[in-house]
Amino acid sequence: MNASATKLEGSIALVTGANRGLGKALVTALLQAGAGKVYAAARDEKQIEATSSRVVPLRLDVTKPEQIAAAASRAADVTLLINNAGTLSSFNVLTARQADIEADFRVQVHGTLNVIKAFVPVLERAEGGATIVNVLSLASLASVPGMGGYSASKAAAYSITQALRPELKKKGIEMLAALPGPIDTDMVKDLELPKNSAADTARQLVAGIARGDEEIFPDPMAQQMGALWRHDPKAFERAFASF
Ligand SMILES: NC(=O)c1ccc[n+]([C@@H]2O[C@H](COP(=O)([O-])OP(=O)(O)OC[C@H]3O[C@@H](n4cnc5c(N)ncnc54)[C@H](OP(=O)(O)O)[C@@H]3O)[C@@H](O)[C@H]2O)c1
């Protein structure tokens, strides 16, 4: 299913969790795609490398309401919001500590939603429309039991993405979901898995934004598993249950 295409040339983007991993690669990919300005948001904005005069470091912990409000007021010209910040704190749901499951939900679900709520008034003012992308995971579509708490938080974030899509469409804002497979970043550094590079995932993710894919599958594994999910969701669930 396709949303309207997003014009990246001259766009003004904001990426959360932009100091490392996929978020840092997304900043580079957006600049390469012609973004006019990229707010690179991070809990510690001093970690943002000034690679271009088009990069604006911004302090933003997505669990801190006062920082979210300050970011929406400072970055009042944003046309493309990418909710990339994420944590992997909770694993097996039977044995995970409640505090760790709550930590994943605090960032992935409440943090993402609160950032969106703060930026809707900014985005609906954008001439020619605006776009929000939630960086989710293939684990949004079926649980990886060894990461059951994380998967549940990503599934909840996908549900919120779907809930927001028609609401935001009325305001001229497209709502996209990015659903990557494993990426070679700190988050999964201890897991023995085939991983795609952050740079390639970011490039493919940005290409999906430009096309207006409602579900963006930004790497080869995601494309393969996304096709299985569309064709046979139970087979997809069984494949993930065996990871
Ligand atoms: N790596 C994978 O295999 C994979 C697969 C599918 C989806 N994803 C998703 O891709 C996104 C990026 O992950 P990654 O692989 O790049 O992980 P990463 O290398 O661990 O980076 C996570 C980023 O999120 C930031 N972050 C964490 N909590 C935050 C908070 N409360 N407020 C603001 N920023 C916060 C981190 O900032 P600090 O440096 O301050 O901690 C860091 O910049 C996440 O949403 C993740 O769930 C990753």
Image (cartoon, rainbow, N blue to C red):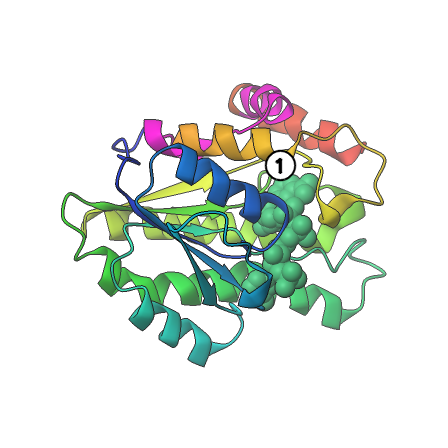
Quarter of the image that includes the N terminus: top left
Q: Nearer the viewer, residue 179 or 64?
A: 64
Asked whether residue 139 is in view, the answer is no
Q: Residue at x 29, y 33 (%)?
A: 3
- List x then y, in percent, for residue 107: 57, 63
Q: Which residue is mark 1?
A: 198
Q: Is residue 203 left or right of residue 117?
A: right
Question: Which residue is farthest bottom?
Answer: 66
Query: The magenta stretch spans which residues?
Result: 209-229
Write down the quadrant of residue 85 in the picture.
bottom right
Q: Which residue is drawn at the image coordinates 58% and 26% (left, top)?
A: 219
Numbered-mark total: 1
Assign a secondary structure to mark 1.
helix
Left or right for 42, reference 167: right
Q: Which amino acid lies under the numbered mark 1 shown in the image of this protein?
A: Ala
Left or right placement of residue 72 versus residue 86 in this view: left
Q: Residue 81, percent across and down?
A: 37, 52
Q: Is residue 118 magenta?
A: no
Circle 1 packing at 10 Å, graded few (<14), some (14-19), many (20+), is: many
Residue 227, magenta (yes or no): yes
Q: Main secondary structure of the magenta part?
A: helix
Quarter containing the C terminus: top right
What residue sits 80% from the left and 46% below the top? 146
- Of residues 172 and 81, the one drawn nearer to the viewer in this rendering: 81
